[in-house]
Amino acid sequence: MTDLTPWGLHAVPAEQLVDIDRLGRVIRVDRGECDVMTVDGVVRVLSDSQRAQDELAPVTGDWVDIGYEDGLGDVVARILPRRTSVSRRDPAERDLEQVLASNVDLVGVVHGLDRPLRAGRLERLLVIAANSGAEPIVILTKSDVAIDEPIEATVRSVARDMEVFVTSLEDRAGLEAVRDAVGATRTLALIGASGVGKSSLVNALVGSELLEVGDVRTSDAKGRHTTTARELVMLPADTGLILDTPGIRAIGLWEAEHALDLIFDDLVELSNECRFRDCTHDAEPECALRSAVEDGTADPLRVDRFRSLAHELEQQRVREEERQRRGDRDGGSGRGRGRGKGRRR
Ligand SMILES: Nc1nc2c(ncn2[C@@H]2O[C@H](COP(=O)(O)OP(=O)(O)O)[C@@H](O)[C@H]2O)c(=O)[nH]1
Ligand SMILES: [Mg+2]
Ligand SMILES: [Zn+2]
């Protein structure tokens, strides 16, 4: 019997566990099938989203109820409500959410110190991390081959009061600290570009070459990468769980207004002093953000990035409202392509 407690079971509210037939946590998702950790060990389960669930496809980290269907075998019958979910805008479809991982406690935004860091990219990843409902942290890898740029200072200016870990696999620096931050029964999801060292970090923490490392990347006909799955792995001696994700290039935000406020709380606070409540900090008179830029107390680039992210989310909201109005008119017809991949809220 596998004890599901180290897999994070205690975080599932008891009332969600009534009427469950076979409980398990999704530890890996492949096309149409997934691996689910259950009391009987890992079970391979069919997860054809189109068939099983119209709107909700299982993602790594989900708690699910496994059912059985004649001719199909084990299937994902139901996905329990997600406590947290890391999601972005689907890169293939502008107005669809794509969930990358669920029920995680920490989201580590990973960057390699061997390459330059664009503050705007880090900000986007942090907004995605914070928007999940989990705690965002930053992990800077490869300190042994760090380039001569003030990356940590940039990270500080963007991540401000978040925890920042600096690691190197060369001398295992920082690894214990990351492991301690995860903690037993908790899940850390890693997100970041390809090649920054996410899978190597997991392997180093696990103590074996469990995950594939290096710039291995193949594409299917549609040009998406399909190599690395999102995988949930247990650290030795039940000291926590890590969820590795393939490198993400496109980091479109999805309904992340609240997280934007968290990452830019200083600017949000300042904007309360703008004359207009709906100030876009563009050409309006008596704009507190523009004044702060003019008198040198706010970073003009950071203010620009804040404005453009806020604008992106606003546009998305407008489109969503329009779609809902249209949907109401045609009586809610029109199933979207690829809808099973995410969830429209
Ligand atoms: N020098 C050095 N190389 C590292 C370190 N961590 C990862 N790498 C290398 O970075 C490359 C990409 O690592 P990988 O884990 O596949 O990155 P991922 O795409 O984020 O999963 C591999 O060649 C690793 O060996 C480190 O701490 N120091
Ligand atoms: Mg990897
Ligand atoms: Zn303003």
Image (cartoon, rainbow, N blue to C red):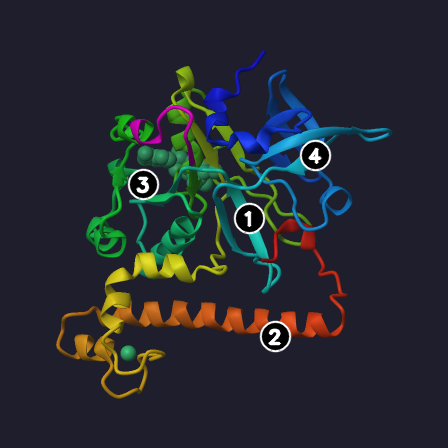
Identify the residue shown where x is 53% and y is 20%: 4
Judge by depth and name the residue closer to the eye, 243 or 333.
333
**Residue wearing tag 3:** 139
User: Residue type at mark 3?
Assistant: Ile
Per the rendered image, the range of residues in magenta is 180-188
Query: Residue 59, percent across and down?
Result: 59, 40
* Residue 174 drawn at (x, y percent): 26, 31
Q: CA distance from mark 4 to mark 1?
A: 17 Å
Q: Position of residue 121 (x, y in %)?
A: 37, 58
Look at mark 1 in the image and give the residue it sits on.
99
The answer to which of marks 4 and 1 sits earlier in the sequence is 4
Tags 4 and 1 touching, CB below 8 Å: no
- Marked residue nearer the N-terminal end (1 or 3): 1
**334 w.r.t. 5: above or below:** below
Question: What residue is drawn where x is 26% and y is 46%?
Answer: 162
Q: CA distance from mark 4 to mark 2?
A: 33 Å
How many angstroms separate mark 2 from mark 3 (CA)?
39 Å
In front: label 4 or label 3: 4
The tag on residue 322 is 2
Kind of residue indicated by mark 2: Glu
Q: Which quadrant of the figure has residue 273?
A: bottom left
